[in-house]
Amino acid sequence: MFTLQSESEGLQTLGIVVVVCSSLKLLHYLGLIDLSYDKIEDELELTTVCYRPEGLEQLEAQTNFTKRELQVLYRGFKNECPSGVVNEETFKQIYAQFFPHGDASMYAHYLFNAFDTAQTGSVKFEGFVMALSTLLRGTVHEKLRWTFNLYDINKDGYINKEEMMDIVKAIYDMMGKYTYPVLKQDAPRLHVEVFFQKMDKNKDGVVTLDEFIESCQEDDNIMRSLQLFENVM
Amino acid sequence: MAAGVAAWLPFARAAAIGWMPVANCPMPLAPTEKNKRQDELIILNVSGRRFQTWRTTLERYPDTLLGSTEKEFFFNEDTKEYFFDRDPEVFRCILNFYRTGKLHYPRYECISAYDEELAFYGILPEIIGDCCYEEYKDRKRENAERLMDDNDSENNQEGSMPSLNLRQTMWRAFENPHTSTLALVFYYVTGFFIAVSVITNVVETVPCGTVPGNKELPCGERYAVAFFCLDTACVMIFTVEYLMRLFAAPSRYRFMRSVMSIIDVVAIMPYYIGLVMTNNEDVSGAFVTLRVFRVFRIFKFSRHSQGLRILGYTLKSCASELGFLLFSLTMAIIIFATVMFYAEKGSSASKFTSIPASFWYTIVTMTTLGYGDMVPKTIAGKIFGSICSLSGVLVIALPVPVIVSNFSRIYHQNQRADKRRAQKKARLARIRVAKTGSSSAYLHSKRNGLLNAALELTGSSDDEQHISKSTSLIESQHHHLLHCLEKTTGLSYLVDDPLLSVRTSTIKNHEFIDEQLFEQNCMDNSMQNYPSTRSPSLSSNNGGSTSCCSRRNKKTTHLPNSNVPATRLRSMQELSTIHIQCSEQPSLTTSRSSLNMKSDDGLRPNCKTSHLTTAIITIPTPPALTPEGESGPHPTTNISTTCSNIVKVSAL
């Protein structure tokens, strides 16, 4: 049958090819390798977390909002976050829509950390509404404490210059590139210096909560501006 | 800022507290909300379907109808809801726009209906979301084409062509051969010569008998002179045609770059190059190659055949699919050629001498041609060869449906355009009938009113009611409006109704010297004299008027003392010119030359009080009788004079 060497060579080639293919199939069957192309479909989100807040009465008791206000707030919240929780991405997107000219992502990041008191990575409606209640309807002390918490990025109880620089730079970023007058390079640093001069009473380079509250209460401008958003709802 | 996140504005403002300690300057005052209302539900009743939403939802877009105070116009006090008498289906999309900030276009909706609704609610179509924007644009383009077609055809029908200069006329003739007979002749002549040229090229190579010397000559060499003359004639025609097109083209640069002109140039170039080149041995090879390009003359037929153009367009639009087909075929050919070469390498006297040599075998096998000039001899070669032919069928079959569907889509588009053109006549006739229908309704009711009034005068008021009931309130109001217009201008609408004579005959029995009676009788008389009185005025159809005039021309009898050349009246093709006439006193002694009012004191008040201007004028009104100054209800003598002064009517 095999008259020529070459013909047997050809058949040998064929045999090798067949053996290789079948071993690949066997490995795939055993699950050691994966020959399928579309891997994306395998990683489906099996559970879309859907969270519902506690009852309206409870929230009303815990916050300083009326039922109607809570309803309006929840409707807006649910519109943007149908799953009931807002994660940092969504938070940044929403906040960025209010500041189209600049880059609000850093400030939104700090804000998110301030809202997310438990550091879970997502903010539920209760947390959202309680923070808002503090900011809009809380006492001056509460508001200042919340602001201190915002500035204290690593939550160690002290605000140092680096943290303040980050915050101030994030705020300046929100303005965008096209400002008048054009932002100077050291403007944030100067701003931070001014801030520290005002706030740091004992000049130890960090600002504690008490220093912060005390200094703010001394400043009329700050006191007045804290009342600015009283009737936002 | 998207409307949806407007609800988060309080949050953003609250978060601004974080800036306060950092700020150096005092903050501006916050805007206070005057008359802040609690958010309330609004009921929108659209044709019975009730939609409800929050007021603030609607106020997100204050420059639309629903977002502004404009909706107060639609507020119904009794039911405390906003009522819109519009389509509820489309309203669903519009309300969703307020809710989600995205406007969608439903596919089942008619594009013009949708556009109308959007315009009503004050929403710009540009904000349609990306998901639906393509579909919307496509449908809108189709609609625009359809409208343009209609407009073009209307322009053509009216015959009101702006005077084109020679260039534009020529270009139009070239592009559309049906515009004039000359263009059609030109079209067929060029087509004929293209065919002649192509057949010449073909016949040139046919062997045409032998010459002593045992050599078979192709016809081209045997009758070289004849073929040369034929070729020259064709090229002359083509050259002239090309130059004329070049001259007539509105944008010469664009024309020269277009495909058809390139084909033209390529078709005639070889001849001229052949003229220029001598019978030099070196370049004769290239010369022969050039003659191949003469076959491109066949592509000139694409101007004559639309199917060819569609095919070309399809191939162009399927370029990517064709490219994919080519690429995949190439890949497969290389793979299989390599495999076959190595499989057949050892076999003796194998034709598979190299991989490129195996390409031929692979192509022939994959396209299932199977010439049989190269066959594998080894078993492995045969196995791989069979795999090759099986896979060839699959690879080629894959892109074909895509190309076919493209072709069918383009073909159907063209079909639609043709169908539209074919139905255009029917469509326009339908529109015309609708127009005449409405105006004849008016005249019908006017006659009824006339009858009513006449009956009133006679005192038989019982009959009047049952006649007027036939028209609805809206119709009667509309007719009243038209009537007022008639009164204002002192003219009236032309009526064409043989029935009128029947009606008026009933009134003739009552002998009134009333103005309207005169008019009626006049009309009646004119009807009798010219029973084929047509009213060209009811439609803006020029054809009608021409027929009217032509008919009238036949029955002209000239007034002995008429100074007005009849042609002056007859020449009025335009239905827009109106000559005032008010009084149709039979005592009018003047001739038609004075188209102004001639007042006869006695009857003047009658003119003012007559409310039915049924005296109607047709364009050339050849009265049969001379105007005699006589007052009295003698229908046969005087009435025609009154008609004569009445001039034209304009269509409403």
Image (spheres, coloured by chain):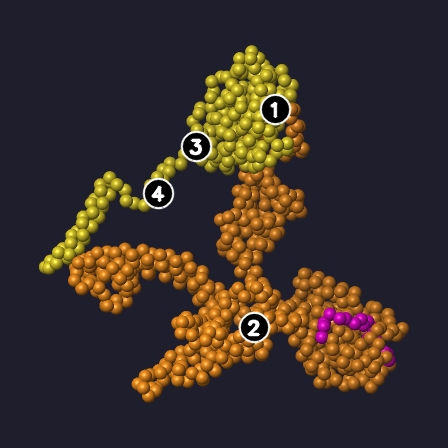
Chain colours: A yellow, B orange
**Quadrant where the N terminus of chain A is found in the figure:** bottom left
First in residue order: circle 3 vs circle 4: 4
Q: Which residue type does callout 2 highlight?
A: Leu
Q: Which amino acid does label 1 sit on?
A: Ala
Label 4 lies in what chain? A
| Local secondary structure at mark 1 | loop
Measured in 3D between alpha carbons, the distance from the residue under mark 3 to the one under mark 2, in whole angstroms, is: 78 Å
**Badge 1: residue crowd in 10 Å (few <14, some 14–19, many ≥20):** some
Secondary structure under the numbered disc 4 in the rendered image: helix
Residue B577 included in the magenta stretch of the image: yes
Task: Please give the residue where the numbered disc 4 appears in the rendered image.
Answer: A41
> How many residues crowd around disc 2 within 10 Å: few (fewer than 14), some, or many (20 or more)?
few
- The lab-note entry on whether marks 3 and 4 share a chain reads yes
Q: In the visual, does A150 lie left or right of B612?
A: left
Chain holding disc 2: B
Magenta part of the protein: which range? B573-589
On the image, numbered disc 3 is attached to which residue? A51
Q: What residue type is labelled 3?
A: Tyr
Residue located beneath label 1 in the image: B23
Q: Residues under labels 3 and 4: Cα distance?
A: 25 Å
The residue shown at (73%, 65%) is B482
Mark 4 crowd level (few <14, some 14–19, many ≥20, 10 Å Cα): few
Residue ID for mark 2: B243
Separation of marks 1 and 3 at Cα, in angstroms: 38 Å
Q: Which mark is nearer the camera, 1 or 3?
A: 1
